[in-house]
Image: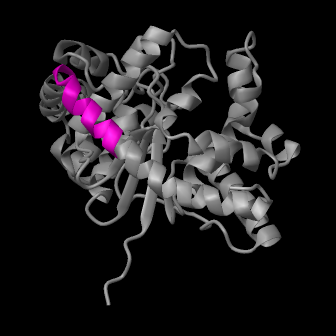
């Protein structure tokens, strides 16, 4: 008898340009996961509006992010890949689950505290409750596993808590998801402050590389990358800048750290930084070329996101109807 493929759910916000950190830390793994799992991916545009957005800009960013993720290798024939706001079950389930999530649980969320500091002029209710929308995103699809980085552990813990709470009140309703820790991929740090994660919201443009960045700028940014005062290329807990560059080079080339150390033995940081930059450029150029094709073909993009939204709506409606019946709504 054939075993049912496990379901994986993951989402990314379409705000700003997608970085090398997003790609190596998450998206590159999504492409591999498609081969062995039932994958459901989403562009989380509903999450994006917790920070004030320009309407025209959000539409543009969403379409460009969709085209870029297809160019990276998400295959709509293998995976469901939809735009979150096109599937109304997400907001419906989020409201219901708001009523099964405790105020104290949300107030402990570190990302709420961080974003409140960054956007002190707009500490809105959505910023406080968006983790529940994230919970709904995951639970709607009876997700078995969620690929997570260290900064998302809290959200998955909340998802599990809410699912278990609802299941214990009403009988099993939701699959309680497990974390999926990829074998490859890593947390990519800022090129200017290697103690911080590479972020598209960082005010220092030299801290990050965008997937669509031109080769000259990529090389310049790697040459300017912050390192220590030594010159030997080796992995060491006291060398966060070099460690970060080694992780990037390893993710792109597939080489292990000891191989990288041998390759650059006696060659110094200058040569190493240039080599990392060149390897990143070689890897990104085919993605950039595919992106240029996809972004011109609006008809194809629309076909992909509409068909995926229909599939996502069908699957998620089953879960939502089950929840609504158990809570006591007439459907």
Q: Is residue 169 above or below residue 10?
A: below
**Which residue is found at the position 59% from the left and 60% from the top?**
319
Task: Say left or right for 62 vs 268.
Answer: right
Q: Is residue 326 above or below residue 127?
A: below
325 within the magenta span: no
Quarter of the image containing the N terminus? bottom left
Q: Is residue 135 visible?
A: yes
303 within the magenta span: yes
Q: Over which residues does the magenta segment extend?
A: 295-307
Q: Give how far across and how far down residue 74 sits, in percent.
A: 27, 45
Q: Which residue is more in the foreground, 51 or 113?
A: 51
Q: Is residue 161 above or below residue 257?
A: below
Q: Give how far across and how far down residue 320 sits, in percent.
A: 62, 55
Which quarter of the figure has residue 4? bottom left
Quarter of the image containing the C terminus? bottom right
Q: Give how far across and how far down residue 75 sits, in percent.
A: 24, 47
């Amino acid at each position: 008898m054939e075993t049912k493929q496990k379901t994986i759910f993951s989402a990314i916000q379409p705000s700003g340009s997608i970085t090398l950190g997003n790609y190596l830390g998450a998206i590159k793994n999504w492409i591999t996961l498609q081969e062995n799992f039932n994958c459901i991916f989403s562009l989380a545009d509903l999450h994006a509006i917790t920070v004030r957005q320009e309407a025209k800009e959000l539409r543009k960013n969403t379409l460009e992010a969709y085209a870029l993720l297809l160019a990276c290798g998400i295959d709509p024939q293998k995976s469901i890949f939809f735009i979150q706001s096109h599937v109304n079950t997400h907001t419906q389930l989020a409201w219901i689950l708001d009523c099964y999530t405790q105020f104290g649980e949300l107030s402990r969320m570190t990302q709420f505290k961080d974003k409140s500091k960054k956007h002190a002029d707009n500490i809105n209710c959505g910023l406080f409750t968006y983790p529940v929308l994230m919970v709904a995103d995951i639970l709607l699809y009876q997700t078995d596993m969620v690929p997570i980085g260290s900064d998302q552990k809290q959200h998955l813990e909340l998802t599990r808590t809410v699912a278990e709470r609802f299941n214990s009140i009403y009988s099993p309703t939701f699959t309680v998801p497990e974390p999926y820790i990829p074998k490859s991929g890593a947390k990519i740090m800022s090129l200017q402050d290697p103690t911080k994660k590479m972020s598209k919201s960082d005010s220092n443009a030299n801290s990050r590389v965008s997937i669509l960045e031109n080769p000259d700028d990529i090389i310049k940014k790697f040459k300017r990358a912050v390192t220590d005062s030594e010159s030997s290329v080796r992995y060491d807990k006291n060398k966060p800048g070099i460690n970060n560059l080694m992780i990037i080079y390893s993710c792109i080339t597939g080489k292990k750290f000891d191989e990288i150390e041998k390759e650059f033995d006696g060659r110094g940081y200058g040569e190493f930084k240039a080599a990392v930059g060149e390897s990143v450029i070689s890897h990104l150029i085919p993605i950039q070329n595919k992106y240029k094709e996809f972004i011109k073909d609006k008809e194809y993009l629309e076909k992909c996101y509409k068909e995926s939204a229909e599939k996502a709506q069908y699957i998620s409606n089953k879960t939502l109807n089950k929840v609504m019946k158990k809570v006591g709504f007439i459907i």
